[in-house]
Structure formats: C-alpha cells, structure tokens
Amino acid sequence: MSDADEFRLKIEAYTPETMPMQRLAEYLAQLALMLGESTSVHFVRLEPGSTSVIHRIEREAVPKVKARTASVRRGVGPRDSVRAYRRINRMLRDDNGSAVWKEETKEAQIIVFPGKDDVEEVISGISQRGSIDGEVVRVGGLQNIVPIMLKCEHDELSGCWANKTVAKALARRLFEPVRLFGTGRWKRNDEGKWKLDMFRVESFDALRDVPLSGALNEIRALQIDWDEGAYDELTAIRNGEIVHGGL
C-alpha cells in the first residue's frame, strides 16, 4: 500500500506470544478511537519482542490524524480521542506496562503512554458554590442535617444534605424537578474525573416539567418585536462571531 504511511504502537507489557487476544482487541479498539478516520486506518501485523502493533494510515488522512493526536497530547483533543488515550493509559497501568505511538519513518516519538509510571494525583476537598438540577427521589433521615437524593439524568446523586426546614419543603416536591443551590465539595479520582463528594443545600427552585414542544409554543406566544437584523445577530453570537459587548 504505497499510498499509506506506516505507524507503530509499541506496548511494553506483553509479547505477541503472551498478549491475550481479548486484551489485544481492547487496545486496538481504543487506538482506533484515538486516531479517528476509521475507514483510513488499517491493521498490518504484530511484530515480536514487545507487542508492536503496525498499522497504516492512508496518506490523505495522515494530516488529520496527526492534528488529532497532537491535540490529544495537549489534552484538548476531541472528547472521544482524549477518552481513548486515557483508557489506553489506564489499561497499561493495569497491565504494569507503558507504550509509545510513533510514525515508522521518524525517530521522534509522537505520543507517549506512561502507563505504570503515571499516577494521577487524587484531589479532594475542592469546595465551590453552584447549583444542581434533578428530580427529588428521597428525603429522609434522623439527623439534624437531612440527606437528599436526586435523580440527575441517568444517575442517582446521594451526597446532598439540607437542614430540616429546607428538607421539609423539598419533601413536598417529591418526584418533581428542582434546582438546588448551595456549596459542593468535589474530588478528582485517579482517572482525572471530578465527582461530587457532598452538596450542602441552602435553597432551591421548583422547575417546570414542560416538554420541548410546549416550551416552544410558549416562546412563540410571546409578543416580541424583533427587528430585521435580530436573527442574523443571534446566529453570529452563536457562532462566536460576536461576543458580549459587541466586540
């Protein structure tokens, strides 16, 4: 395939003889996600020694892949690519190994996966004021500070607490959507993900559970006098062409 450039993922954890097939498939799947351009990346072979996954990228796709991986290396790439990079690194950490991804014709390493040598710092105790939206699914407890459970999208959030006055008012909103206001304490785990540790509820607003179609009908019913350029201006703001203050 002369119209393609060759690349290598060298995994310092297994040899081709000891690499479980399922684990190899997991590495290949995450590598494909990280690189993108799925129809232009082709597996070629495994090489002996450390497990070296040789693959070719069609030449017209190479600049896109390089731009994507450069942004991943800076931690600002597409979400699926950054997530795949972190997944590979976590797999290597679990396998007590490391890896490097590079272009075969170049000596310089393009992406390094420290794996076993990379220990993400765990950070806890970060407090910040904010709000949380969700459906009240449980209010109760014998403490002076009452535990509150919310259903937020597909997760249940059980780290919320309120005094008895606020908790009593929230109990009247059971199975209804609310917005809680207060101070939360957040922590980052060893995978770099932030999770809520505790949220002290100070007040809340009841939210209306209105379907999108109903909300749109209410907006249409508003008597707003739009000038001729309003739509163009809103489009420009949405696309980042106009920032606040008209600058």
Image (cartoon, rainbow, N blue to C red):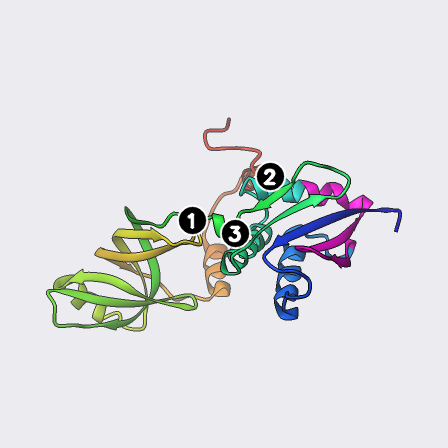
In front: label 3 or label 1: 3
Rendering quarter of residue 136: bottom left
First reached walking from the N terminus: tag 3 or tag 1: 3
Please tell me which residue is depicted at 78% across the width and 47% down the height of the picture. 6
In front: label 2 or label 1: 1
Q: Residues within 10 Å of mark 3 (few under 14, many from 20)?
A: many
Q: Give the spatial CA distance, label 2 vs label 3.
A: 49 Å
Q: SS for tag 3?
A: helix
Q: Are marks 2 and 3 in contact (CB under 8 Å)?
A: no
Residue 83, position as x, y percentages in the image: 54, 54
Q: Are marks 2 and 1 in contact (CB under 8 Å)?
A: no
**Magenta stretch contains residue 31:** no
Q: SS for tag 1?
A: loop
First reached walking from the N terminus: tag 2 or tag 1: 1
Q: Which residue is mark 2?
A: 232
Establish if 146 lies above or below 8: below
Residue 244, position as x, y percentages in the image: 46, 33
Point out which mark residue 120 bears.
Answer: 1
Q: How many marks?
A: 3
Residue 139, position as x, y percentages in the image: 22, 71
Q: Which residue is mark 3?
A: 115
Q: Residues within 10 Å of mark 1 (few under 14, many from 20)?
A: few
What's the residue type where badge 1 is placed? Glu
Establish if 76 lies above or below 207: above
Nearer to us in this view, 16 or 63 = 16
Residue 109, position as x, y percentages in the image: 65, 39
In front: label 2 or label 3: 3
Magenta span of residues: 40-66
Q: Give the spatial CA distance, label 3 vs label 1.
A: 10 Å
